[in-house]
Image: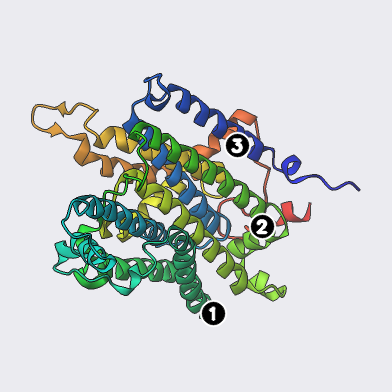
Amino acid sequence: MKRESFIARNPSVLVFLAALAIFTLVVTVASEGMGAGLISTSFVKTLGKTLCLCLIAVAMDLVWGFAGILSLGHFAFFGLGGYMIGMWLMYERTRDIVVASLANAPIPPTPAEIDAAIGTQIFGVVGSSDFPAIWFFSSSLTMQLILVVLVPGLLALVFGWLAFRSRVTGVYLSILTQAMTLALALYLFQNDSGLRGNNGLSGLQNLPGVTASQSLVSLWFLWASAFALGCGYLLAAWVVSGKFGSVIRGIRDDEARVRFLGYSVEGYKLFIFTLTAVIAGIAGALYYPQAGIINPAEVAPIASIYLAVWVAIGGRGRLYGAVIGAAFVSLVSSWFTGGQVPSVNLGFYTVNWVEWWQVILGLSFVLVTLFAPKGIGGLVDLVQGVLVPNRHGADYGPDQGSLMEREGRE
């Protein structure tokens, strides 16, 4: 029997990659950076950031939709990736400014004087001028890129090992991940955290040594974000397509049964948790240079809750659903909160959409959960004419999409 190729078994992957390539090409041609000017530079940045959010949504769908681990802390890994690359960007940008300002000094400055001036520029806002130990590799792009992967991965590995070996599951695990995120955010808010406290890292949109315009730089980040999303989607689809994917779905639906069959449930969960943390860190490292700033508020637990909402609205357990949900909510959020939607005067009350957007988002999550558990991604089934199997008997597992007893026998 001839074994089908990965693409043959997963044609939706090829469709997604083709759609992503066409989208990137169209935006590139229509952008200001290429001269057409049909799409503004600010909107190109918004689209690039949206692609990064789609990437972390894929990671969230992998850990929650397929493995059944509702993590309310994945935005912490996203923020850590942003902080790691932000340290290099801020250091090198400040170094360029300091060197330029001291270029006409009567006596050329020593390297120690340059470092002291850089430290004063960066940490003067928190009353310090010394570089903390965590900035040791900030002058090396290679090392900071390694830390983008290493720091979120190690945090997830240690946290996951402690949680999964104790067999913490369900809502208790969700609470623990949220507590981890809150603890990290509170630590980053402190001035002595070494990351400028509440001020965060700023000016990240300025690439050191690059004289190209922002319109062109925004395209570079759009391409990088699209490439990362394509690779992340391909990796996630490969992970869930084979035997490994069957095992993590089994863990989601009936963890005790999978453990009884002899599989190392904790090992599988730890691998997925760590892998998705690394993907989230990479997404964050691409997002914040486009945003231009990162502060501890970005790591707050509410951000991870929003992430779960995006995946639920898009349709968890479907990688393309996670992408659809993140893109839809991100772009609609930018539209509502950007002041582009006029307020509605009801006479007795004026509806300001900037204030009401979060209420709308919350109601959408509730309505989708109650009436459309497959989310927006479920519409793909209607387009394809896919009928839901006639299922009988009790669920194999508690989640949407679990097989039924009779269906399993048939």
Is label 3 in a helix, a strand or a loop?
helix
Residue 374 seen in render: no
The residue wearing badge 2 is: 245
Residue extending farthest to the left is 348
Q: Nearer the viewer, mark 3 or mark 1?
A: 3
Kind of residue at badge 2: Gly
Relative to 245, residue 339 above or below: above
Q: Position of residue 169 (x, y in %)?
A: 49, 71
User: Which disc is residue 118 wearing?
Assistant: none
How far apart marks 2 and 1 lie (CA) works out to 21 Å
Q: CB of mark 2 within 8 Å of CB of mark 1?
A: no
Residue extending farthest to the right is 1
Q: Mark 1 Cα within 10 Å, few/some/many (few <14, many 20+)?
A: few
Q: Mark 2 Cα within 10 Å, few/some/many (few <14, many 20+)?
A: some
User: Which disc is residue 17 wearing?
Assistant: 3
Quarter where residue 65 is shown:
bottom right
Residue extending farthest to the front is 106
Q: CB of mark 3 within 8 Å of CB of mark 1?
A: no
Is label 2 in a helix, a strand or a loop?
helix
Q: Earlier in the sequence, mark 2 or mark 1?
A: 1
Q: Position of residue 212 (x, y in %)?
A: 37, 35
The residue wearing badge 1 is: 165
Give the mark count.
3
Kind of residue at badge 3: Leu
Q: Earlier in the sequence, mark 3 or mark 2?
A: 3
Give the left or right position of residue 389, taking residue 330 as reference.
right
Which residue is rendered at x = 26% and y = 40% of the image? 357
Is label 1 in a helix, a strand or a loop?
helix
How far apart marks 3 and 2 lie (CA) works out to 21 Å
